[in-house]
């Protein structure tokens, strides 16, 4: 089982932030998932590849390809990155697209063409097509059944995206025409609707577990993006409801079931069930997991080794924000590892 953490430029600053990421992830024994749209961008990021401390072997890397990549137009770009980084990266994550439903024959042929191109690359990385565009998970799973014969293309299951989709569908059945995620902007309505929000959120974990279990029959490695979420979350500066730590909660402006906060879709107990289901369905040798958690609004003071990376910085605020983010990733990683034992 390969475990990785998100490493990218979410926080403003120079390369010292990435060097801190390399240090902290390496200490924890975590690989890195890096975003890139060109070979040059990825080459620059690979300078910060974590390694086991001190002076140990490099840890695994996956590449989250640019979100604007779309097949078949992006095929040449994907193959270019695959060829240049063959033997250096484990896998590349490519977003799915509504064309999977709107133009299924064309999308399928594009994916098959990509697989044929990868077959010509020695020591090629996997390409993992991520559940990302809000399709019905059953449609996404059916597509991977159709391409089960492809030897170099598999799935990336994003548990946060699947869970938010399921919670939204469940809430809409109770309240047709209402978007559960919009309620975060209507706090005056929440007290009367909170029980239905809870019921909708409770459907996320079973949906994710069912989807994970169905991938065991494919006989291929599957990549996972792990993060928690909740339809009422306002933490993200990007306006999404997920990419949260499994150790967080949602603050409420009123008391609900004796608390002034709500649990997330999964929490540590749900993460444990996700990891156990993943290992049971696929086996540890066919599983890679990235903690795709965005920076939380926390700061953490730098230890002496980390502080030396920022000797040229006068204001250490963003360094401490990066350190807080990395500490969150490491804490979630420790929880994840406990789940797998």
Image: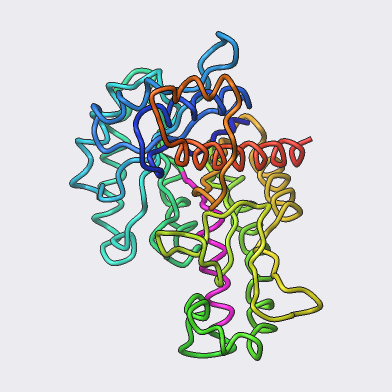
Q: How many marks?
A: 0
Between residue 145 and residue 182, name the one nearer to us: 182
Q: Position of residue 266 (x, y in %)?
A: 68, 59
- Which of the 4 image quarters holds residue 79? top left
> Is 255 displayed left or right of 324 in the figure?
right
In the picture shown, does residue 25 fall above or below 156? above
Q: Residue at x 25, y 50 (%)?
A: 68
Identify which residue, 275 or 42, lies in the foreground.
42
Outermost residue to the right:
258
- The chief SS type of the magenta part is helix
Colour mode of the rendering: rainbow
Residue drawn at point x = 57 percent, y = 19 percent: 305
Q: Residue at x 24, y 48 (%)?
A: 71
Residue 22 covered by magenta stretch: no
Q: Which quarter of the rendering shows the N terminus?
A: top right
Is 220 situated above or below 110? above
Please say whether residue 165 is one of the residues in the magenta stretch.
yes
Q: Quadrant of residue 188?
A: bottom right
Q: Position of residue 337 (x, y in %)?
A: 71, 35
Horizontal and vertical percent for residue 258?
Answer: 81, 77
Determine the residue located farthest toward the top in the rendered image: 55
**x and y percentages locating residue 103 in the rendered image:** 26, 63
**Foreground of the two, 88 or 28:** 28
- Kindly identify the residue that appears in the image at 22 percent across and 43 percent down: 74
Residues shaded magenta: 155-171
Query: In the picture, which quadrant includes the C terminus?
Result: top right
């Amino acid at each position: 089982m390969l475990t990785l953490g998100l490493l990218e430029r979410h926080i403003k600053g120079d390369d010292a932030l990435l060097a801190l990421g390399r240090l902290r992830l390496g200490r924890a024994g975590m690989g890195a998932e890096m975003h890139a749209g060109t070979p040059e961008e990825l080459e620059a990021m690979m300078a910060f590849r974590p390694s086991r401390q001190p002076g140990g072997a490099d840890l695994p890397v996956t590449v989250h390809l640019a979100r604007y990549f779309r097949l078949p137009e992006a095929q040449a770009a994907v193959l270019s990155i695959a060829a240049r980084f063959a033997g250096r990266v484990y896998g590349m994550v490519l977003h799915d697209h509504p064309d999977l439903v709107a133009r299924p024959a064309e999308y399928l042929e594009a994916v098959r063409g990509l697989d044929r191109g990868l077959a010509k690359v020695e020591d090629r990385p996997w390409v993992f097509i991520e559940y990302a565009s809000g399709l019905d998970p059953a449609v996404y799973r059916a597509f991977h059944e159709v391409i089960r014969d492809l030897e170099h293309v598999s799935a990336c299951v994003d548990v946060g995206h699947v869970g938010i989709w399921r919670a939204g569908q469940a809430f809409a059945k109770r309240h047709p025409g209402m978007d559960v995620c919009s309620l975060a902007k209507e706090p005056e309505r929440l007290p009367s609707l909170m029980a239905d929000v809870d019921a909708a959120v409770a459907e996320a974990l079973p949906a994710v577990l069912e989807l994970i279990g169905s991938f065991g029959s494919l006989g291929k490695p599957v990549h996972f993006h792990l993060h928690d979420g909740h339809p009422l979350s306002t933490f993200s500066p990007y306006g999404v409801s997920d990419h949260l730590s499994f150790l967080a909660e949602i603050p409420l402006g009123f008391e609900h079931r004796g608390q002034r906060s709500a649990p997330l879709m999964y929490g540590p107990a749900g993460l444990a069930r996700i990891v156990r289901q993943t290992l049971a369905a696929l086996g540890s040798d066919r599983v890679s997991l990235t903690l795709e958690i965005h920076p939380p609004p926390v700061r953490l003071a730098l230890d002496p080794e980390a502080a030396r990376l920022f000797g040229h910085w006068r204001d250490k605020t963003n360094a401490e924000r990066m350190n807080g983010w990395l500490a969150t990733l490491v804490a979630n990683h420790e929880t994840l590892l406990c789940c797998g034992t």
